[in-house]
């Protein structure tokens, strides 16, 4: 299989070390990658080696979302990572963010592509894009994710292409690359069903901008998925019962509406629960296509899954690679601009299911900062989908740290989604449907249905004492609002 | 001028008292109206009279946004108002919300039309729609606002039309009524410029549903606008200088992008400042068309203004009525679903300018609850525009209550817009452009540029002590986060 189909580009092939020399201290680098899928690996590792050998290199890194350890991890440990947009999940980059050595802006993912184009993140000096191949016209065929690659390519001064020979050639054709113009020239995005194909199978690229082509065979560093535990099963069960009731009440079609689901084990379990449900002919319009989606496709439950990346487990990656032609018939990988676009999410009416760190009695959600200050991963696309969903669901286990933390608190320590954004809250304890409820009604519904029994009385106590105050719309006690978090930080327990 | 152009409907004319008898205790009523413009008046007053005379009537009221005193005020005082969606500004309804007698859900305005259609707010028993006239087909021609009227008409079991003869007949043709289908049948909204007309000039209505037609001549109870003070002028000046610089840097076109501006005196002043600027051929895609917009149209600065209501002052109303044919050429009134739609706001790339009660050092905004618990008005459309803007600006005066309240605080007492949603903060002190900044950088930028000098040291003191803690991404001190609000509630001052 010819990987470089435009002959004039063959002289751009070089080693990762040589390509890395194009990247200078102080630059802003935008790369492919979304979750540990489809990110460049060889050039970042070569750059990290230079820094470890003493060269001063400090960079700004912009990606679609998280990327693998060869990029976020190696760069953070080598001291290269100075500024980071818009999401990460790597232990080393997280440490850098929380010790203050990495400046991190946690962003709505749908904002990133347009902020790059608007110039709000400054000049993009270099793009590094993992590719399957380069087409006859110089177009770049992505691998296991798309993310911000189209904007990185169009806005960067130069492009380094990292052709990854470990990726299945059956990925060719799975991508659907469509981008919007900047205002005032932007047009409607012509997607009306999750499975619509509206673009090209490659990322258009001016061949003159391709400054280097590197070959690599390092595989995506996918992460293991936790086993599906009892709590996740209960959460999944509550959601499926709720969805069944919505269908019975005539508020949802029999085959629901396109499902969006966050990343990780609980999200995977929630989707997994659909396997044993009576739902059929489902569609997904989401960011990441995880293992449970493969199960749903194999079972004939899901006809089409649209996302911006394949995010399998280690076993899932093998399964995906061995059956890529099969899955490619049911899957579409789109640019993050499109997978997360408010316009499309609102039009399709996605059912958004995302995971919270904590939520409060009035329905505000913390997705990012533990105890207010400590960044976990980031916001990701949760806001893009939550705000624009047909119905928005947040899940969490009701306690953490062996019961010392209640995930339902008087006032969340950081707000990523407001009381105006979420309709349904779910823990293993139960489900709170807060549509149409005032804040005080919401509080009772959430405490009754979602809080762990160990914390219910404490939550009601806060609510009732707050209600004894002067103003009764959304009563709070300002010197106790974050007292549970303070107590945990002081004593190791919210109790 | 014939007000009822469908002959078979003439026998539906009755008194407001008779029409009010169609409304029974426990019903949900959805009405026209957005700001004190275009809301029904006679039927609500007749209903209030019945309640005041001892009849037990408790209702749920759904409107576009705030409405005039004949509806929110009279119903709150008569004890009719039990549940209220999604916004209000009336002293009596606000008192009811804050004393706990009215259950209020404060919503994103763009969510309301679809939540009505989805059945999330329950059955809509009666719609009351203020109209100029009824067309030959039974279509309803709105008056000075559109709001949720299309959905109220389509979803209600019966419709009461209140023909208001005080409204200028020159309003006919100013409306552009376009609605979307529910998912999975929703299509792209074909608007690509603020001035595009894509619908009908009337609200389609099954004539069989029209249960009563009432004539009224009560005028809109418009509100006076505060004089433009020095602080508002300074805020306006900072914004215009910023926009000029964005044009110079090539990040905005010469004629900017469609302007969105919140309601009220500061918003009016900000737009007013454009009169003396060099900007020309501006467009507006917003909710409310206020007095300053008439000035900009008259000066030839604004070519088209799209909104969902005319919201003039008392003098503005006279001016509007006397020159309606002139303003109708430059203005379009759309359903709130379209004026506030994320799809259109994001596509057009609006410049969103909204007013905060307070914002915090990390860039979270409180638009609704004073000291965390006391509802002022509501969220309105600020979230619809802010999240989807090309660039989002929030303004506030840096102090309130003669300096006893700082509008910049360590942690806002209620979060309506998150750090992920806003790019620019402005007070009379200056402007903070936080694009691309990490939370701690943002804090310094906001304190330096926006805080009142009396509070700067206190804010830096909080920030620096928080930074001394263990986690440095977005450092907070959990037992001091709301201490400023607590201090104000205890002592009457944040100092």
Image: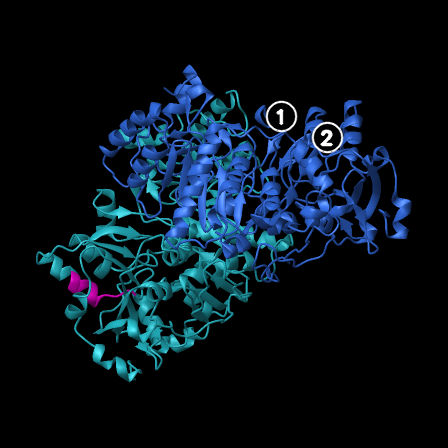
Chain colours: A cyan, B blue
Magenta stretch prevailing secondary structure: helix
Question: Same chain for marks 2 and 1?
Answer: yes
Quadrant position of residue B321: top right
Disc 2 element: helix
**Residue A300 image offset from top left, x and y in percent:** 50, 70
Sequence-wise, the earlier of marks 2 and 1 is: 2
Q: Nearer the viewer, residue B357 or A372?
A: B357
Mark 1 burial class by Cα count in 10 Å: few <14, some 14-19, many 20+: some
Q: Is residue B422 above or below residue A49?
A: above
On-image quarter of the N terminus of chain A: bottom left
Label 2 with label 1: CB-CB less than 8 Å: no
Q: Chain of mark 1?
A: B
B216 to the left or right of A414: right
B226 to the left or right of A61: right
Look at mark 2 in the image and give the residue it sits on: B70
A166 to the left or right of B397: left
Question: For the magenta stretch, what is the residue range?
Answer: A39-47
């Amino acid at each position: 299989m010819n990987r470089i189909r435009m002959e004039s580009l063959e002289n751009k092939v070089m080693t990762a070390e040589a390509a890395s020399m194009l990247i200078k201290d102080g630059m802003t680098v935008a790369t492919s990658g979304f979750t540990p899928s489809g990110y460049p690996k060889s050039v970042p590792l070569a750059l990290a080696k230079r820094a470890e050998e003493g060269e001063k290199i400090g960079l700004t890194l912009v990606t679609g979302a998280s990327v693998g350890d060869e990029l976020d991890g190696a760069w953070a440990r080598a001291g290269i990572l100075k500024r980071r947009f818009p999401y990460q999940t790597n232990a080393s980059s997280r440490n850098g963010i929380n010790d203050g050595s990495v400046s991190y802006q946690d962003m709505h993912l749908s904002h990133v592509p347009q902020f790059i184009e608007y110039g709000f993140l400054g000049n993009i000096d270099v793009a590094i894009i993992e590719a399957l191949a380069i087409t006859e016209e110089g177009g770049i065929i992505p691998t296991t994710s798309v993310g911000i690659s189209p904007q990185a390519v169009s806005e960067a001064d130069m492009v380094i292409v990292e052709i990854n020979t470990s990726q299945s050639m059956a990925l060719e054709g799975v991508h659907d690359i469509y981008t919007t113009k900047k205002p005032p020239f932007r047009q409607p995005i012509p997607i009306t069903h999750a499975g619509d194909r509206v673009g090209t199978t490659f990322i258009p690229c001016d061949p003159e901008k391709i400054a280097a082509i590197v070959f690599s065979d390092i595989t995506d560093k996918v992460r293991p998925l936790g086993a599906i535990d009892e709590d996740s099963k209960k959460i999944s069960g509550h959601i499926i019962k709720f969805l069944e009731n919505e269908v019975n009440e005539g508020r949802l079609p029999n085959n629901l509406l396109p499902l969006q689901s966050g990343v990780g084990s609980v999200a995977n379990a929630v989707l997994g629960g659909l396997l044993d449900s009576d739902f059929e002919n489902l569609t997904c319009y989401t960011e990441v296509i995880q293992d449970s989606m493969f199960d749903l496709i194999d079972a004939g439950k899901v006809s089409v899954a649209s996302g911006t990346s394949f995010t399998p487990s280690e076993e899932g990656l093998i399964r995906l690679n061995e059956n890529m032609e099969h899955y490619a018939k049911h899957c579409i990988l789109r640019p993050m601009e499109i997978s997360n676009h408010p316009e499309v999410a609102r039009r399709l009416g996605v059912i958004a299911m995302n995971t919270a760190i904590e939520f409060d009695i009035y329905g505000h959600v913390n997705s990012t900062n533990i105890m207010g200050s400590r960044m976990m991963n980031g916001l990701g696309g949760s806001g893009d989908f939550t705000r624009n969903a047909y119905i928005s669901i947040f899940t969490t286990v009701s306690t953490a740290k062996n019961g010392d933390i209640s995930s339902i608190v008087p006032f969340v320590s950081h707000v990523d989604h407001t009381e105006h954004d979420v309709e349904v809250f779910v823990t293993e304890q139960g489900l709170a449907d807060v549509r149409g409820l005032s804040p005080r009604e919401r509080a009772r519904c959430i405490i009754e249905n979602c809080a762990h029994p160990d914390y219910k009385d404490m939550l009601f106590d806060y609510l009732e004492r707050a209600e004894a105050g002067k103003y009764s719309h959304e009563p709070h006690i300002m010197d106790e609002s974050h007292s549970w978090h303070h107590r945990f930080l002081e004593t190791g327990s919210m109790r």
